[in-house]
Image (cartoon, rainbow, N blue to C red):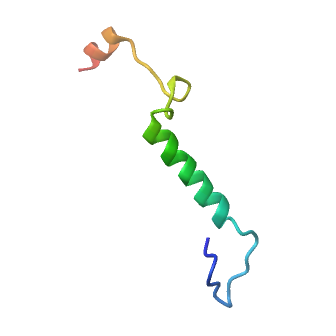
């Protein structure tokens, strides 16, 4: 995760910092634009069932 400092006792198996930053930026942009979550990422509930639940 760290791109500038790696302690001596740490073995880096991968450098994922750039990928994590890109993914988080993409998530932020999509949530701000209202693209995510979309209907394909959500569950709905029948209105009658919701009233019964309350």
Residue at coordinates 33% horizontally, 11% vertically from top-left?
Answer: 47
In the image, residue 21 sits, relative to residue 50, either above or below, namely below
Which residue extends farthest top? 48
In the image, residue 27 sits, relative to residue 13, either above or below, namely above
Which residue extends farthest bottom? 8
Tell me the quadrant of the picture where the N terminus can be found.
bottom right
Residue at coordinates 68% horizontally, 91% vertically from top-left?
Answer: 8
Instruction: Using the image as rendered, state which of residue 31 and residue 15 is in the foreground.
Output: 31
Instruction: Using the image as rendered, state which of residue 24 and residue 10 is in the foreground.
Output: 24
Which residue extends farthest right? 13
Residue 54, image x and y in percent? 23, 20
Residue at coordinates 68% horizontally, 83% vertically from top-left?
Answer: 10
Residue 14, image x and y in percent? 74, 69
Residue 53, image x and y in percent? 28, 19
In the image, residue 50 sits, relative to residue 20, either above or below, namely above
Residue at coordinates 61% horizontally, 59% vertically from top-left?
Answer: 20
Q: Is 2 on the left-hand or right-hand side of 36? A: right
Q: Is 35 on the left-hand or right-hand side of 1? A: left
Which residue extends farthest left? 54
């Amino acid at each position: 995760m760290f791109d500038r400092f790696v302690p001596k006792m740490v073995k880096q198996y991968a450098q994922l910092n750039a990928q994590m930053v890109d993914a988080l930026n993409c998530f932020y942009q999509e949530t701000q634009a209202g693209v995510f979550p979309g209907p394909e990422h959500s569950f709905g509930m029948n209105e009658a069932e919701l009233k019964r639940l309350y």
